[in-house]
Image (cartoon, rainbow, N blue to C red):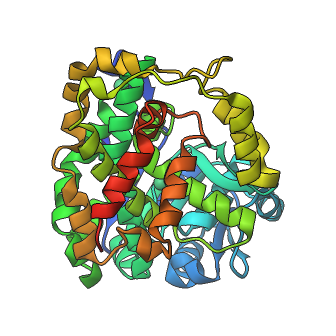
Amino acid sequence: MLERREDLLGATFDCECGREHRVETREIIMGQDVLKNLPGLVARHLGEGRIYVVVDDRTREAAGQRVFDILKKAGVTVEIYVVSGYPKGDVETVAVVADAVQSAAGVITVGSGTVNDLGKAAAHQLGLPYFCVATAASMNGYTSSIAALVNSGLKTTVPTTPSLAVLCDLDVLAGAPLELTYAGLGDVVSKPVCNADWMLSHLLLGSHYCPRPFGLIKELEDVYLSRAGQLKDGDIETFAALSEALLYSGVSMCIAGSSAPASGAEHLISHTIDMRALLKGHEHDLHGAQVGVGTSFMVRLYHRFLKLSADSFRNQEPVDLDQLKKHLTDYWERNAAPVIEQTLQQFDEEGRPQVLPETIASRWDEIKERVTPFVAGAERIEQALRVAGAKYHPDQLGMTMGDFKTIVMECSYIRNRFTLLHVLRDAELLSDMTDQVLAEWTR
Ligand SMILES: [Zn+2]
Ligand SMILES: [Zn+2]
């Protein structure tokens, strides 16, 4: 059953994990010279009526104008809506886009990142069918069922309907700014860490785990890691592997019904950097660039973790929750409330963690055996980022080792998602082990 990746599209299927999964995205068209398929995609997924093409100034130039021209020539009733300037990915801008396209029968977004999130969230709000035309292999949001939006100064993910189809013209993707491609590479290489974290959560907290997501990306991983150095030359086959991995990374979140297979501790690191930048009014780097650095760090930390022995894990004194709340209030200032809410879910009323270190000690052999396959050989990830010319080290994000350590120490609190950072934090091993990793980590 469902042997090939593409058989999953639009399918509802019984999985070996014991659950039934449903993939909302029905069609992916990827290749060179594929924009000519647009009229067919509109007919299959958006139907009759006025179609709005949502772009920004840059994505209009990359492909948006061509999308509009092709559809117009094919006799489709089509309008173009340009989100001008450098659009913000916030709920206010979604409302503006939704207002502009409300008379549409369907929406096409042309763009990556923010434009994609805005068009997707607006179409979702209006209950309109939509699909997207990718302009960069920069993120996994094309097929995911969430949009990342800022709401009242806080970064949130809002549930949305995934794109019904995705059109990836590989010449358009290969022509995108390199830093966007590098961000895509940085985002997708996180899979071994996400899945190792997800396995820890499965073993220690009983979270549902499905092996499909990791399996989906695994076959493509060899191609984009071994050929990462060819991205800068616009090598079409490498772009195809990277894009496909990003698209199925989004699909894997639909399968899992959560972002767990594509978002572990390395994403907590990136989100914490974003949230601090938002709080302090600083700039931050691209999501995928930060995730790539977070992944390189986490792989190093995992390798140290797996060298520990059961007697490294001893129960500690319960956490003083009042003191912790005070600390979080000092660190997150006006944005502390949601962080504290997430933190309190990670401890009982007496300040004991969700998983006691002694539980880890008592199951150490099993944990080691189940987690090792994900991260064995994962040092080649940092190697691939280096060879590609992408970011792999805190220094490249403009951070000192001290800044980066602070982020590592804080990021387990921002979200109640169990990761290796939580395991080490609760065993009071995180600070020393982070120091050890940072001390040996040269650029
Ligand atoms: Zn990501
Ligand atoms: Zn499954």
Up the image or down, 374 lies above or below 368; here it is below
Up the image or down, 97 lies above or below 176; here it is above
Residue 367, position as x, y percentages in the image: 27, 24
Q: Is residue 320 left or right of residue 337?
A: left
Up the image or down, 345 lies above or below 50; here it is above
Residue 79, position as x, y percentages in the image: 70, 72
Task: Please state which of residues 259 and 307 is positioned toward the viewer in this rendering.
Answer: 307
Task: Please state which of residues 227 and 186 is positioned toward the viewer in this rendering.
Answer: 186
Task: Please state which of residues 317 and 264 is positioned toward the viewer in this rendering.
Answer: 317
Task: Please state which of residues 226 and 377 is positioned toward the viewer in this rendering.
Answer: 377
Q: Is residue 15 left or right of residue 375?
A: right
Q: Residue at x 28, y 52 (%)?
A: 300
Tell me if residue 384 can be seen: yes
Q: Residue at x 26, y 23 (%)?
A: 310
Residue 373, position as x, y percentages in the image: 19, 36
Please identify the quarter of the rendering in which residue 371 is found. Answer: top left
Q: Residue at x 78, y 57 (%)?
A: 153
Quadrant, the N terminus: top left
Quadrant, the C terminus: bottom left
Q: Ligand 2 lies in which image quarter?
A: top left
Q: Is residue 40 left or right of residue 73?
A: left
